[in-house]
């Protein structure tokens, strides 16, 4: 998966903040997952879902449709307690961003609840 922008994907979204937040994009973003390209225009409101734990297993990727009770990640604490994370929103997963510099596993899942992203099938070859 690639995020084509002059700035890195990680710098477009903050890793600190509330676990669930509506966010207005400051840049146009194009996301390519190998089969489809997603275009999200500047000024569009998306939902950010943040989670952090000692170890994280993420179960969703770009292009997945999630429901309010879909398990999107498994979180394991330092003491070995395992819990599942559900988003509480439904929509299309546009991007899953990991923070490589965090002390623990930190992720932001970007969800299009309003259906405003443009999905285009990309062909490869001649």
Image: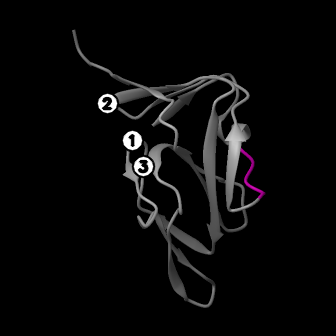
Q: Residues within 10 Å of mark 1 (few under 14, many from 20)?
A: many
**Residue drawn 41% across the image and 26% down it:** 37
User: Which numbered disc flags the more N-terminal residue, 1 or 2?
Assistant: 2
Q: CA distance from mark 1 to mark 3?
A: 6 Å
Q: Is residue 35 left or right of residue 103?
A: left
Q: Residue at x 65, y 67 (%)?
A: 52
Name the residue carrying label 2.
Answer: 35
Above or below for 23 versus 120: below
Q: Are marks 1 and 2 in contact (CB under 8 Å)?
A: yes
Q: State the quadrant of the C terminus.
A: top left
| Element at label 1 | loop
Along the viewing direction, whichever of 51 and 8 lies nearer the viewer: 51
Mark 3 = which residue? 61
Q: Nearer the viewer, mark 1 or mark 2?
A: 1
What is the x, y in percent for residue 78?
63, 85
Q: Give the main secondary structure of the magenta stretch.
A: loop
Image point 51% across, 30% down: which residue? 116
> Can you identify the residue that label 1 sits on?
63
**Marks 2 and 3, the one that precedes in the sequence:** 2
Residue at 78% of width from left, 57% of height from top? 16
Labels 1 & 3 near each other (Cβ < 8 A): yes
Circle 3 residues within 10 Å: few <14, some 14–19, many ≥20: some
- Sort mark 2 into few (<14), some (14-19) or many (20+) by Cα contacts within 10 Å: few
Relative to 110, 119 lies left or right: left
Q: Are marks 2 and 3 in contact (CB under 8 Å)?
A: no
Quarter assignment of residue 23:
top right
The residue segment tinted magenta is 13-17
> Under tag 2, what secondary structure?
loop
Give me the disc on residue 26.
none
Residue 101, image x, y percentages: 71, 55
């Amino acid at each position: 998966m690639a995020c084509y922008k002059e700035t890195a994907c990680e710098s477009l979204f903050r890793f600190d903040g509330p676990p669930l937040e509506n966010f207005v994009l400051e840049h146009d973003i194009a996301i390519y997952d190998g089969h489809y390209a997603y275009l999200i225009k500047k000024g569009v409101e998306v939902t950010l879902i943040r989670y952090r734990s000692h170890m994280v297993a993420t179960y969703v990727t770009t292009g997945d449709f999630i429901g309010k009770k879909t398990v999107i990640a498994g979180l394991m604490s330092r003491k070995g307690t395992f819990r599942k994370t559900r988003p509480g929103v439904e929509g299309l997963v546009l991007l899953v961003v990991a923070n490589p510099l965090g002390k623990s596993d930190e992720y932001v899942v970007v969800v299009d609840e309003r259906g405003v992203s443009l999905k285009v099938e990309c062909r490869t070859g001649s």
